[in-house]
Amino acid sequence: MELSWSPQKGSIAMQAILAKRGRTRLVQLFSVLVVAALVSLGAIAEEVEQQTPSEEVDKEVPVTLASILDSKPNPKDYQKRTHCISKIAIRDHEVLSKRHIVFTMRGEGRPKVLVQFGRHCFGLHRKALINLESRGSSRLCVGDYVRTEVFEFGRRTWGPRCTIPDFEPITDYQLELLRDALQTGRVE
């Protein structure tokens, strides 16, 4: 193999080497700029994180019974409430107290729905006969009424209306806990 040098060949080869070095330097410069930008973004993120309270600080607060009772519950922690239920789908009902009625629905697993009045419903007791009054439909909705049968002056009449505030799905386990709390007087 013969090596020869000509001014034209040499200059083209030299230009290629310089161009390659120039691109390498350009890539190196670009890499340095990217790394510097990332480092500065990391420093900014640390400053913002230090300025805003983090969730870890909240977790370090000791949980006491008083703090639980004084706190407001998060609605996301509870099941979805139902606005209406079908009267036809009601299989049975159970009056638990002056403020609680549980409806057992027809269907798979026989789901249960709790109605919890804000205050005592006049005439409501464990063996009370109840009348469900809805506004012209076959569904019982929030804002409809429950009335109990009352004996006045030797005759039967319907007592005052109790407005249904909402329907809450309730499991069998939750129902047992509620019954226990009602029997022991922890809930009225």
Image (cartoon, grey):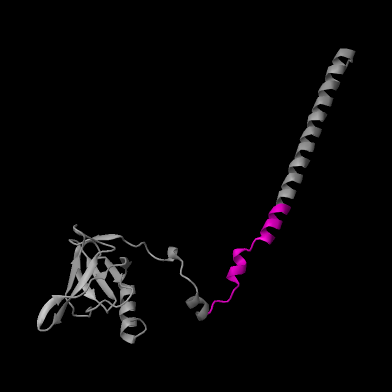
In this rendered view, identify the residue nearer to me: 32 or 184: 184
- Position of residue 153 in the picture relative to residue 82 (left or right): left
Q: Is residue 134 left or right of residue 56?
A: left
Query: Residue 158 appears in which quarter of the rendering?
Result: bottom left
In the displayed orientation, state which residue is furthest to the front.
153
> Which residue is at 81% across, 34% downward?
25
In the rendered image, is residue 2 in sight?
no
Q: Position of residue 45 (x, y in %)?
A: 68, 54
Q: Is residue 164 visible?
A: yes
Residue at the image point whose x is 14% and y is 82% from the top:
152
Work out whether residue 41 or residue 120 is closer to the camera in this orientation and state it.
120
Q: How far across and down, in percent of the image, does residue 8 sit? A: 86, 13
Please state, as top left, top right, bottom left or bottom right, where the N terminus lies in the image: top right
Quadrant where the C terminus sits is bottom left
Give percent across and percent down for residue 122.
24, 78
User: Magenta includes 52?
Assistant: yes
Establish if 31 lies above or below 166: above
- The one nearer the camera, 188 or 3, is 188
Residue 32 in picture, x, y percent from top left: 78, 41
Looking at the image, residue 176 lies above or below residue 36: below
Residue with the most extreme left position: 154
Which stretch appears magenta? 43-64
Residue plotted at (71% across, 49% down)? 41
Q: Is residue 22 magenta?
A: no
Q: How many marks?
A: 0
Query: What is the quadrant of residue 82 in the picture?
Result: bottom left
Q: Main secondary structure of the magenta part?
A: helix
